[in-house]
Amino acid sequence: MDIRICYLVVIFAISINVNLSAQENKKYTPLELSELVYGSSGFDYNKVLPFCCDMHSLNFKDSTFGQLLPADTKRSFSLIYQDDTSAVTSISLKIADESMDIYFYFTKLEDWHIETLRTLARTDMIKKTLMEIEKLPFDSAMKVISVHGYTDLDKYIKRNKLLLSSDDEIADYFRSNYEKFNEIAEYIIKNDFINHEKGLDFANSDSFVKQKLDSLLIDRIVPAEEGNVFEAGFLIGGILDNTAGYFYQPDTLKVPPINKLLYIIIKPLGNGWYMYKTT
């Protein structure tokens, strides 16, 4: 064999080995790991070990989360937060007319690892209730929602559909009603309703507040939790402590941190406004 050909063969073989080694030892970012786990292609679990902590026992030798989804699932991935030791990503899934947003929480050991995931819980109960209500005659449906203190069937349905919407749709709803949200926030702040001595029941019974919140499909104004301060908090709805809504806080130092045990996601909407979900 010509010495030049032998040389090229050796170089080619070395190149293949280097590339394979680089692939096996690739340091994945949180966003790249999210795309691997919920993507449609899957990955080699013997080469990529993405989990630790709460999720260390997961084994994807047969199929990944992403491979279990229907073929027509639309996926989008975004990095929400990252520092030297932790990160949060958002995975948005659209399947036919339904959507779901999932949040991965990462910790940095030698490499990045997914320690747990969260999503807005108990949505199946809300979906089931909506399906049942929409099948009922008007009077029967009104009896169902009146038990929970609601008097407007159309707005009850729309509010819960907003709650079940994707994060992007919840954000778009806010942006399309930005001026209305600002108006009610200014009124709440002017009257110091969040810290009112008579409590938020008094604030939520205010005629102007009730009218404005009703027009925005907002259930009620709410305070922040665990000592953090909202200038104005707006609850869309939820079950028990699994809720979603918006809040206004122009001071970034007072914005609650994302926390897998409380504020599972906080997304900035601009001008001091945020969308949030809790668990």
Image (cartoon, grey):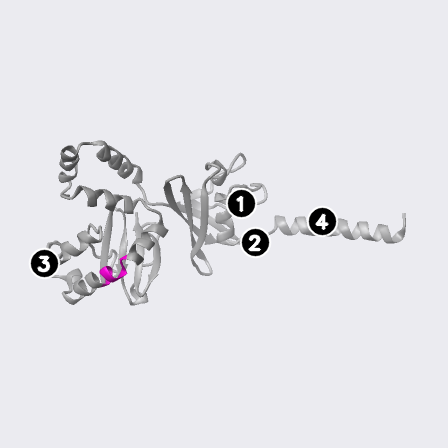
- Residue 152 image offset from top left, x and y in percent: 16, 44
- Residue 227 image offset from top left, x and y in percent: 24, 60
The kind of residue tagged 2 is Lys
Range of magenta residues: 177-182
Residue, disc 2 = 27
Residue drawn at (50%, 44%) of the image? 39
Secondary element at image label 1? loop
- Residue 231 image offset from top left, x and y in percent: 23, 63
The kind of residue tagged 1 is Leu
Q: Number of marks in the image?
A: 4
- CA gap, disc 1 to disc 2? 11 Å
Residue, disc 4 = 16
Earlier residue among tags 1 and 4: 4
For the residues carrying marks 1 and 3, which lies nearer the camera in this image? 3
Magenta stretch encompasses residue 50: no
Secondary element at image label 3? loop
For the residues carrying marks 2 and 4, which lies nearer the camera in this image? 4
